[in-house]
Structure formats: structure tokens, C-alpha cells
Amino acid sequence: MVLTKILAVDDEPFNLEIIEEILEDLDFELKLASSGPECLSMVEEYMPQVILLDVSMPEMNGYEVCKELKANPITHDIIVMFVSARGTVEERMEGYSVGAEDYIVKPFGHDELKQKLNKLNQVLIEKQQLEKQVKEATSTAFNAMANSSEMGQIVNYIENIGFINDIQELGKALVECLQAFGLQSNIEFRCNDTKSHFALNGVCSPIVIELFEMLKSKGRLHEFSHRILVNYELVSLLILNMPEHDEQKHGRIRDHICFIVSVTEQQLRAITTKQMLVSQQERLNKVASTVHSKFHRLIGMLNDSRINNEKVFKHLQEELEERIPTMGLDEDQEIFIYKKVDETIQNSVARQESVDQVKKAFAEIEQDLALLLKG
């Protein structure tokens, strides 16, 4: 099911008019509410898929309205995007802590709102497609948890990722490991100037991706409410449902996930290093092939030159042997000519020895290249 129904909530009529104007040429059914209580009174009957919710409103602010929506099983799954004049880290974290999926800062343009709605539409589609799989995977994870200790899960994870050579597979393995602890996770990998995102439901919401970006350089650990964000250089992990009422378990799980992220980062480095080495090996193979081809082409040219020289000298020698006796030369003159011809032939033989030395040098270089490629 694609995104078709939107509810916009704002106490300023002008802001609602702007939203109406932006969305009027799109295929959305739009309803408006001017306060938090009005939103709550109509939401169950209208059941929008997305609520554009102003933060600063009298009677009930947007955070309070969102809490009510997420506390109600009927409206819990409605996507909430906060609309606010402020976009600080604290504002976004507060929005995320009460369950919002995205955040847009006023004043916003037509394209910005449309782009965010398109992203939320994709999130909605993928969530619906994966809902059944998530339920089955969650059931499997809890069964596995019942049959294995927490440390056993960690050991299994470490052993398994040692055989993984693909970044996407590593991200999925980390999600499954955390799922075995009953934890809902969002993950970001940063390597080779590329970011990859993984989540229990298959996608990270836009507000989570923004939090990763804003907090990746703000320290190793952030805890807010029953959520925790762990930052490493290449990996960030956001857990959505840390144990709230068991302090001992909370601390134990926090230590576990920090260790798991650390191990994952090392494997991610190993994968990227191996990929780099494979790429270098491929380039070296190409260079070796090119050198080999040029060596043999040059040797072929030298051989052709030698063969041509031999033909020339043989022809010259035959011609001299035929003509000198008829030229009326005295013996000293004949000896002089034969000597010069012989010296020239000997010099040619010396050049052939140089060609053989070049061939030998080329053969040694090729052997060195072959050893380097094997290493």
C-alpha cells in the first residue's frame, strides 16, 4: 500500500495553507487539524498514514500528541513527521524519543517536503512488505535466545563473521545477532566514502540517518530514555528498546553491544582491507600482463633484426667470394677485404651475444614478477 492519506496539524492557518498548496498537485488525500486535541479526536476515524505534526502548539505540543498516538495501539504505526522552526540535535532527539520517524525545519520549500514524503512513502512500502518476515524473524530470535546464553550468542557471532567477506552480509549478521538478544537495532557502516544502513525492519527512517550524521563525532556512547547510540569510527549502532526496569540487565546489555560493535568494526576493516588488496592484485596482474607482452614483442623485434643481419652478411660473403677472384687484385688486397668482412661478421656475432643477454634479463624480470604475484 502506497502513501495516500496525510493529516497536517498546526495552530497557524498560514502554515496549513502552505502545506495544502505544496500537496495540491500530488495524489494525496489531505485533512487539516488546528490543534493537538483535534488531531487526536479525528485520527482514529481518518487513519492517515502520515501525520505532519507541528511541535509548538497551545494546549498540547507536538511531543505530547505524538506520545498519545504511539501509546494507542490503533494509531501506534502511523508515521509522524515533526514540523518545527528549530532543528537542533536536542529537538531531533526529543522527537525521535517520542516515536517520530522524520523531522522537517520551517521554513521549508516545496521540493524538500515532497522529497521527505517520498522517502516516508518508501519506508511505508518496505515496512509493509517486511512486516511478516520481521514477525517470523523475531519469533525465531527469541527461541534461539531461550536455548543459548548471552555470551554464547556473542561467541557464535564472532565465529560466524570471521567467514564473512561482504559488507552487506556483515550488516545483516549484526542485525540478526542483536535480534537474538531481543534488541531492535539501526546500524550505519561508513567505509570507502560510502554509507550503508541496516535495520530490523529492513530500512532506517530518515530521522535515524540524520541522528547518525549529527552524532557520529560526539563521543562513544549516548543514552536517552530506553535508547542507546554507540559510535565507533566506522560503525554506529542505535538500539531502540534497551531494558528499562532492570538496571543490572541494562548495564550488561550495554557492555555486550559495545563489545559487539568493536568486534564488528574490526571485521569491517578486514573486509575493506581484503577488497583493497584484491583490487591491487588485479591491477598488478594487468601490469604484469602488459610487461610480458611488451617484453616478448621487443624480443621478437630483436630476433627479426638478427635474422635480417644474417641474411645480409651471408649474401655479402657469397657475392665477395664470387667476384673478388675476378677483380684482378693482388694477394694483400684480397686478404685485406676478407679480413674486413670477417671483422664485420664477428661484430655482428657480438651483438647477438648482447641480444641473448637482454633475453636473459627479461626472463629474470618475468620470474621476479611471477614470484611477486604469488606472494
Image: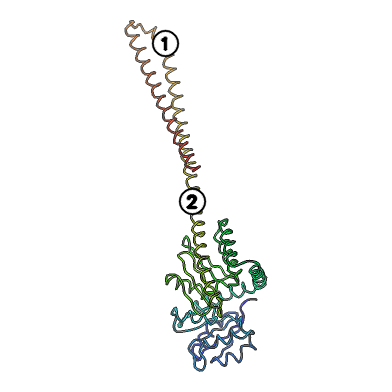
| Residue drawn at x 45%, y 34% as measured from the top left | 364
**Residue hosting label 2:** 277
Q: Depth check: give the residue in front, 89 or 327.
A: 89
Q: Is residue 267 above or below residue 299?
A: below
Instruction: Please identify the quarter of the rendering in which residue 66 is found.
Output: bottom right
In the picture, the quarter occupied by the N terminus is bottom right
Q: Which amino acid does label 2 sit on?
A: Leu
- Report the number of discs: 2
Image coordinates of residue 285 in percent, x first then y, are: 50, 44
Q: What residue type is labelled 1?
A: Glu
**Residue hosting label 1:** 321
Judge from the rendering whether residue 242 lies leftward or rightward of residue 141; answer left or right: left
Farthest left residue in view = 332
Image coordinates of residue 340 in percent, x first then y, are: 34, 15
Q: Depth check: give the residue in front, 81 or 184.
A: 184
Image coordinates of residue 174 in percent, x first then y, are: 56, 65
Q: Is residue 373 above or below residue 18?
A: above
Q: Is residue 215 above or below residue 53?
A: above
Mark closest to the chain's N terminus, 2 or 1: 2
Judge from the rendering whether residue 302 lies leftward or rightward of residue 186; answer left or right: left
